[in-house]
Amino acid sequence: MSYHVTKKLFLQISFLCMFTTTINSNLSDQAKQSTYQNPWNYLEYIFVIKPERELSLLTEHAFATVGILGGLAVAKEYFYQPTTSQNKTITKDSSTNYDPIKSIYIAGSGIMAAKAGYGLFNCVAKRYIHKKTLAEFLQKWDIHRMHLPTSFIECFDEIATLYKTQGDTLLTNMFVAEVFELIQHHIEHHFENRYKKPETKNSDPIETFKNCTEIWTNFKK
């Protein structure tokens, strides 16, 4: 199967999972809002926690589907033997030489393809969820407005006005990404301890050389 065919199939599965995977909730927006006394926590729930949960569920469903299709493909390869026009079973040539280099190349290519496929799906799914989140938020802006930090009111008033006149055409990938980047930037600064990135330790060159020397010494024994 060529790369383009595989990519097309993967995208079709991705979009199928997107439109068939829904998160049902019996709680109204007012009920959810009543549980949040802190406007910043409510903002974080809408634009960070809820989208991440949706992305996690979507990824699980999508790769479960891919796993099932992969299992069926493997089963077909090993348990289904095509027949010739004379209804004779085709058997593989047992004398075919095993090429370890080719096997390693195929395995490596498969790993790289899987990694690229995961990255592609994650990117497409995140864009879809972010766009859907922002659209639903703007459609109910009057409800959300009184429960957000005051510093965001003016900004979202402007966005909501544009959305009323332009609709979903306003929500381009670049615009949605800009809005989420702005919100997440302020959230990370407001909850600085919660989103504090772990410090990267600078390795000591002398210590690294010493460890490498010890490993090489043990290897020669």
Image (cartoon, helix red, strand yellow):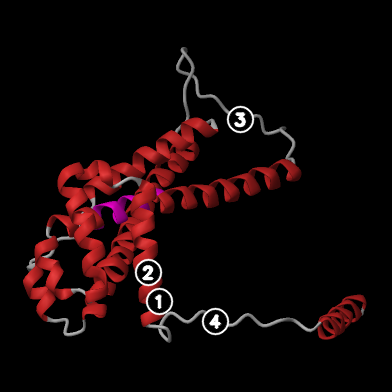
Question: Which of the pair 52/1 is nearer the observer?
Answer: 52
Q: Could you tell me how far apart the alpha carbons at marks 2 and 4 are, in whole angstroms?
A: 18 Å
Please give the residue where the numbered disc 1 appears in the rendered image.
Answer: 188
Give residue 66's position: percent from left, percent from top.
Answer: 39, 47
Please give the residue where the numbered disc 3 appears in the rendered image.
Answer: 92
Classify mark 1: helix, strand or loop: helix
Residue 64 visible: no
Q: Could you tell me how far apart the alpha carbons at marks 3 and 1 are, in whole angstroms?
A: 59 Å
Q: The residue under label 1 is which amino acid type?
A: Glu
Classify mark 3: helix, strand or loop: loop
Give residue 179's position: percent from left, percent from top.
Answer: 34, 59
Q: Mark 1 or mark 3, which is nearer the start of the sequence?
A: 3
Question: Which of the pair 214/167 is nearer the observer?
Answer: 167
Q: Mark 4 or mark 3, which is nearer the start of the sequence?
A: 3
Which mark is nearer the camera, 2 or 4?
A: 2
Span shown in magenta: 124-133
Q: In this view, does 81 lie above or below 27?
A: above
Q: Mark 4 or mark 2, which is nearer the start of the sequence?
A: 2
Q: The residue under label 3 is which amino acid type?
A: Lys
Classify mark 2: helix, strand or loop: helix
State the residue at coordinates (32%, 69%).
Answer: 48
Which of the labelled discs sits on residue 198, or is there none? Answer: 4
Please give the residue where the numbered disc 2 appears in the rendered image.
Answer: 184
Q: Is residue 130 magenta?
A: yes
Contact flag, marks 2 and 1 (Cβ < 8 Å): yes
Q: In this view, does 184 lie above or below 37?
A: above
Q: Residues within 10 Å of mark 1 (few under 14, many from 20)?
A: some
Q: Mark 1 or mark 4, which is nearer the start of the sequence?
A: 1
Q: Could you tell me how far apart the alpha carbons at marks 3 and 4 are, in whole angstroms?
A: 54 Å
State the residue at coordinates (43%, 34%).
Answer: 8
Q: Which of the 4 quarters of the picture holds residue 144? A: bottom left
